[in-house]
Image (cartoon, rainbow, N blue to C red):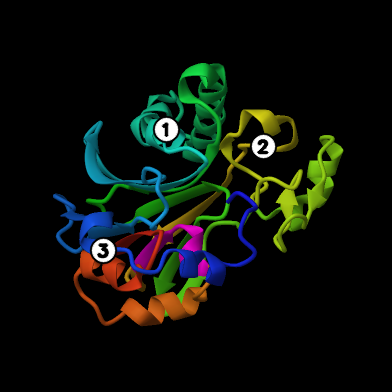
Amino acid sequence: MACFSSSLQQKVQEKVGLNPSHNAESGKGKSKMSKNITHGYHLVKGKANHPMEDYVFAEFKQVNGSELGLFAIFDGHLSHVIPEYLKANLFNNILNEPDFWSEPENAIRKAYRLTDTNILEQGIDLGKGGSTAVTAILINCQKLVIVEIIANVGDSRAVISKNGVAKQLSVDHEPASERESIENRGGFVSNFPGDVACVDGQLAVARAFGDKILKKHLTSEPDVSTETIDDDTDLIILASDGLWKVMSNQEAVDAIKGIKDARSAAKHLTEDDISIIVVKF
């Protein structure tokens, strides 16, 4: 998300020659309550000489007699510490909100704000940089009506497929589309030094966790949406921005609709410096 390279193509060219066996991580799981719900994830690290900056959270969890599916991708920039912190803390903060079960969307917004405040307060320990996030929570996995809550800050994306038709559930928080609010906070949007619009010429997303030096001009306020999982639902894709720069939502769905295994589907979509979660229904 930092404004250093002029295009994804240049970024990929710089990373030619990575060895996937040493730079990849994958996993899979399934619901205990509904045998039809499975998940798989796959991450590929780029060739750059720094620790992996993406973190994935994917698990089913029993809470208050209900099963939740908790899924997230945290895509760090200039830091692997902050996305690692988010993996350890964001869902705990969400589930600890007293009104999670009665008003989940409001609880998620409050938890996002609390988590970002905690990150900024621990700036000395957590260091510079920041992270985007896209989270999906499946509520009541054992019931006929499953509710999915999607929340995101930044440009990682959630897409659902129903009867093979892709629908984007999250919002891409790009500086160009949020120029007015950035300028109202005293910042500016510039395409210099690259050809990508960036906040203060430094960050290619308008919302993120962390980024203390830019925080006055950024926000960590998530967009939150609710979706009902019904018999028409095929799958959900959560992916970092690298996938969406080279594939449309529909192309991504079409590429994996015939792959039954969720981890294999995630791996099929992953090329370089990309993180993918696929949930199959």
Q: In this rendering, would 226 be left or right of 22?
A: right
Q: Check disc 2 and report the residue beneath it.
A: 219
Q: Amino acid at mark 2?
A: Thr
Q: Check disc 3 and report the residue beneath it.
A: 20
Instruction: Name the secondary structure under disc 2.
Output: loop
Q: Amino acid at mark 3?
A: Pro
Q: Nearer the viewer, mark 1 or mark 3?
A: 3
The answer to whether residue 271 is above or below residue 115 is: below
Q: Which residues are magenta?
A: 235-244
Instruction: Name the secondary structure under disc 3.
Output: helix
Circle 1 crowding by C-alpha within 10 Å: few under 14, some 14–19, many from 20: many
Circle 3 crowding by C-alpha within 10 Å: few under 14, some 14–19, many from 20: some
The quadrant in which residue 259 appears is: bottom left
* 236 inside magenta stretch: yes
Q: Nearer the viewer, mark 1 or mark 2?
A: 1
Give the CA distance from mark 3 to mark 2.
Answer: 35 Å
Percent x, y of residue 55: 36, 45
Instruction: Name the secondary structure under disc 1.
Output: helix
The quadrant in which residue 146 appears is: bottom left
The answer to whether residue 190 is above or below residue 65 is: below
> For the point 52% across and 17% down, which residue is it?
124
